[in-house]
Amino acid sequence: RKSGSRKIGEPVRPISEEHRYDHVAQTRPYAVSDVMADLLNVAALSLKMGGRLVYVIPSMLDFDESEDLPRHECLRLISVCYQPLQTELGRRTVTMEKVKEYNEKNRAHYMENTWVNGAASADKVSKIREKLLEAAKKKPGYEEKAALRKQKRKATKDAKKKAKKEAAAKGLEGTTGQQGCS
């Protein structure tokens, strides 16, 4: 969830005038499945009849467009274009068109039926990072490469700490012996 974004239906809390310019919005988790459901719902609500929604969704090879793409009763699927990015990972550009008027009374029904297979379909989109990591671990030489990356990160961190200590020590050297002078 992006900073300051909120789910549909959450009340808007006004920010007092004294905090308006230095306010930092609270960030809260926002599940990918909820983001997609909200995206389609807002599109169905706000698009004019015949208007189109185009979005990109990440996907693995086991992604089934007929079951794993989010749906909305007011939107018709026009096209899906797959672009491979890695052996296991790709993205799909999805185009949908508004074909039915949105009925606010059916909002809960629309939201419940976004994912054809419920959580199983939503998980295929939301757990991409975990799946990529699992696939990487199966490749030969993964453990050695991971150990090397860990060593490099530690060396970089240690070098930064050392440089910071040296800079602090140099800063203190210039101030020693100056107290009590008149």
Image (tube, grey):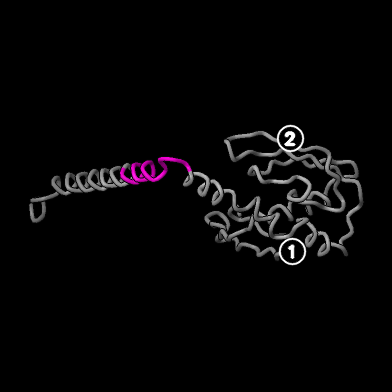
Q: Position of residue 49 (x, y in %)?
A: 90, 44
Residue 144 drawn in magenta: yes
- Residue position marked by numbered label 1 in the rendering: 9
Quadrant housing the N terminus: bottom right
Q: Residue at x 51, y 49 (%)?
A: 134
Label 1's element?
A: loop
Q: Residues within 10 Å of mark 1 (few under 14, many from 20)?
A: few
Could you say which is closer to the camera, residue 182 or residue 7? 7
Could you say which is closer to the camera, residue 131 or residue 163? 131
Dominant SS in magenta: helix
In the rendered structure, which disc, 2 or 1, sits on the residue that comes first in sequence? 1
Question: Is residue 66 rendered to the left or right of residue 25?
Answer: right
What amino acid type is highlighted by mark number 2? Cys
Q: Position of residue 74 (x, y in %)?
A: 87, 51
Q: Is residue 174 above or below residue 109?
A: above
Question: Is residue 149 rendered to the left or right of residue 61?
Answer: left
Start-end of magenta stretch? 139-151
- Residue position marked by numbered label 2 in the rendering: 81
